[in-house]
Amino acid sequence: MPSAALSIAISARMDEFAERLLTWHDQHGRKDLPWQQDITPYRVWLSEIMLQQTQVATVIGYFNRFVDRFPTVDELARADLDEVLHLWTGLGYYARARNLHKTAVTIVATHDGQFPNSQDQLEALPGIGRSTAGAIRAIAMQQHATILDGNVKRVLARYHAQAGYLGVTAVAQQLWRYAEMHTPKKRTNIYTQAIMDLGATICSRRKPLCGSCPVASGCAAYREGTTEAYPERKPKTEKPIREARFFVVTQKSGATLLEQKPADGLWGGLWTPPERPIEQSPDSFITELGYSSEQMESAHIAPRFRHTFTHFHLDIEPVYIQVAGDPSLVREGLEQRWVFPEHLTSGNERIGLSAPAVKLIASLQPPFAENA
């Protein structure tokens, strides 16, 4: 049995996993990503939120445009939510953008424009969970903190051959224990970048590059030849299918009608062609808007297309309608407005659009499709 002094020395020694990972990152890790430059809590927070369920290659352009427009948390807090959602259009999971805005407002109002430096205070902010708070503390504040994002879960699940679906509480708790065990007290900021990098570039979801992995010698899944089995996938269930009609109403001038979604629902706060039940007819919709049936110059029902959410499929049936008359006949207000597709392209209209809105507007204005 080792002496107390030897036990302390062993526990103080950096974990071999962390040592190998840090050495690899010093030589091969990515160091030129935009959020790795001019590191601040704001930039780390923004990148962590954008990278949730989104590839690095996709995020880079969005991140650069976002910080160009909102270089500080103060400027983001002062922004109109429509503009925030406009810059987020196409990135998906729009609750992330709404929570970014809420958090910026809270930080300015409650924390004097400074990110709190404790785990509990960070987690109390909208959209910031345990791992994101850990990343902010570790990378931007150089504190000893632990992360467990999607890439890290995959690395640790394979390294320890952790059985079970990651969505199961007991499995997630065990992975947190592994994450805390491996996180070194020194160079925590570099280690945090390194383990995320390893998952993104080497320990990929499909066809991991085990021959280039710095920790392969200790990886249980690699030894067993079962890397593809970890982490276990979510048990498959059939997603329900819902149906809706999207009414794409245009004037001869080219203006098209958009409607803003309620803040607390799907596509919350985004603008989209009016969505109605699949049973609603063009005639009844036109009447709802305040037009007479004689003012409907044409109506065309286009083939359906599918938009998939996490929990269900939405089959969308576009109905293209051209109307005659003054656009002011439609009730203007916060929930409805006429827009010109070319104004969305040029940036004169800075509003957030749902993915179906982008697709449907692109069908009216080809240049929009090219620049979306």
Image (cartoon, rainbow, N blue to C red):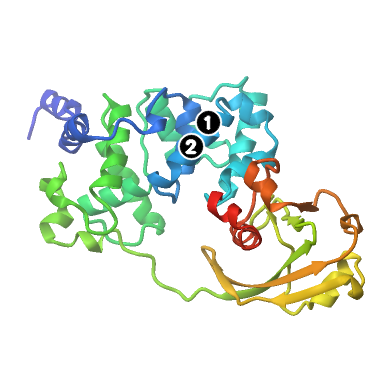
In the visual, does 69 lie left or right of 147?
right
Specify whether residue 118 is in view: no
Residue 291, compared with residue 343, is above or below; it is below
Q: CA distance from mark 2 to mark 1?
A: 6 Å
Q: Callout 2, which amino acid?
A: Phe
Q: Nearer the viewer, residue 28 or 171?
A: 28
Q: Residue at x 92, y 71 (%)?
A: 292
What is the number of the mark on residue 63? 2
Mark 2, other Cα within 10 Å: few <14 / some 14–19 / many ≥20: many
Q: Callout 1, which amino acid?
A: Val
Examine the image and state in which quarter residue 6 appears. top left
- SS for tag 2? helix
- Residue under pointer 1: 67
Specify whether residue 205 is in view: yes
Mark 1, other Cα within 10 Å: few <14 / some 14–19 / many ≥20: some
Examine the image and state in which quarter residue 35 appears. top left
In the visual, does 96 lie left or right of 212?
right
Q: Nearer the viewer, residue 189 or 201?
A: 201
Q: Position of residue 123 (x, y in %)?
A: 52, 36
